[in-house]
Image (cartoon, helix red, strand yellow):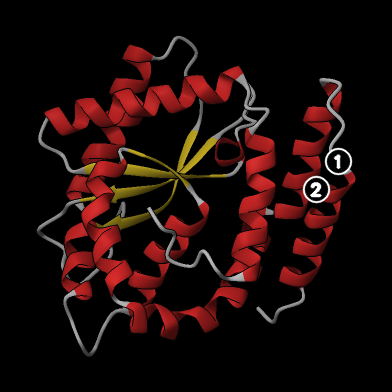
Amino acid sequence: MKLPFEHHPLIKEFNEIKRYFRKHETKVSKQRIGDFYRFSKILNQLGYEVAFDFVGSLNFGVTEQSSDVDFILYLGCEKHLNTDCDQQNCSLFKEVKFLILETLMKEYVKEPYTTQVVDCINLKRLDRELDKTENIDYDLVFRFAFYRSICRGVNLKILKPYHLKLLKRKKLLKELEPYIEDVIAKFNQTMTQNLSFEKYRIRLNEKGIKIPYSVIEKMKHYLYVSNHYTI
């Protein structure tokens, strides 16, 4: 599917860098993506509307055994249509998180690993906001558009209806575009993207893979430009 912000220069540059690293995907990355496909299938069979978007090393395909898995959790929650779903206020969030960390991880993964829910988006609330013509929760819609523009997803069939509905809101996406630079700057700071890029480069070098000069330049340019926006 078309990415919501695919034409933005920083989004394009980020995804070009990501695509290079994904060409050298590790076995561990493939295994963990497979784990989450299994998790999502089981959770869907249990009646949960669940999907995932990954950030960090799994997004780039360079995960190692010691790596954590950071992800955005998508939930279909009917109870919280005015607030975010999180650990404090949503029992569904806690149920799914418990099932992933305490049940599925222990039952289906030979070597369990640490996971972290970076953000959670309630798809039912998102759907309602995308139907509005005024008083839209721009923060919620932007987060979805941003994640869908830069992340690696699992169980995308769940996200497809919302993704397609968002793409039809061209004027709304245009209104959200000016916030991309500041959000990327904050995202880079939170995820320490400069350190991550260097870590990923070292991992490839240790395998005898020399990153092309053109990719190194893209990494430098992306970090320079994105880090010079005001946070």
What residue occupies the far top of the structure in this picture? 110
Residue at (57, 20) in percent of width and height: 28
Read off the residue under disc 2: 215
- State the residue in front, 173 or 69: 173
Residue at (75, 46) in percent of width and height: 197
Residue 77 horizontal side relative to residue 146, left or right: left
**Mark 2 surroundings: few (<14), some (14-19) or many (≥20) residues within 10 A:** some
* Residue 216 position in % (x across, y down): 85, 49
**Mark 1 surroundings: few (<14), some (14-19) or many (≥20) residues within 10 A:** few
- State the residue in front, 75 or 13: 13
Residue 181 horizontal side relative to residue 30, left or right: right
99 vs 17: above or below: above
43 vs 56: above or below: above
Per the model, the C-alpha gap separating discs 2 and 1 is 5 Å
Residue at (49, 67) in percent of width and height: 5
Element under disc 1: loop
* Residue 142 position in % (x across, y down): 40, 71
Read off the residue under disc 1: 212
Element under disc 2: helix
- Quarter of the view holding residue 95: top left
Which amino acid lies under the numbered mark 2 shown in the image of this protein?
Val
Residue at (36, 16) in percent of width and height: 106
Tag count in the figure? 2
Labelled pair 2, 1 in contact (Cβ < 8 Å)? yes
Q: Can residue 85 be seen from the camera position used here? A: no
123 vs 157: above or below: below
